[in-house]
Image (spheres, rainbow, N blue to C red):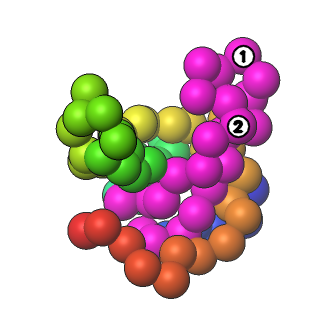
Amino acid sequence: MEPVQVGDIIQITNEDDPWFPSLLIVSEVKSWGVQAYTIIPASNTGDEKPGNAYRRLKYELVTKVGTAAVTAG
């Protein structure tokens, strides 16, 4: 995989992952992989609270697809 930096957008490419094929924004780069998040918007019904959902992912499970113009962090 091409090197990633904080603020890059990655996609989960492992079809066995429950979040496949989600897009996430990298918040931390580690030697083994990344910590990244996706933004959960407020729902119209108020059932879900807005915020960020974080994942730790090994490099072999994701692919870099771009860089975020705006980040939540």
Q: Decide if residue 72 is on the left or right side of residue 25.
A: left
Q: How far apart are the alpha carbons under marks 2 and 1?
A: 10 Å
Q: Which residues are magenta?
A: 6-27
Q: Which residue is mark 1?
A: 16
Between 41 and 70, the one lying in front of the other is 41
Q: Position of residue 12 (x, y in %)?
A: 66, 40
Q: Position of residue 31 (x, y in %)?
A: 46, 50
What residue sits 72% from the left and 52% below the top? Answer: 63
* SS at circle 2: loop
Q: Could you say which quadrant of the image residue 46 lies in?
A: top left
Inspect this view and state whether residue 70 appears. Answer: yes
Amino acid on which disc 1 is placed: Asp
What residue sits 44% from the left and 49% below the top? Answer: 38
Q: Say whether residue 38 is magenta.
A: no
Q: Which residue is mark 2?
A: 21
Between 49 and 29, the one lying in front of the other is 49
Between 43 and 1, the one lying in front of the other is 43
User: Are discs 2 and 1 less than 8 Å apart at CB?
Assistant: no
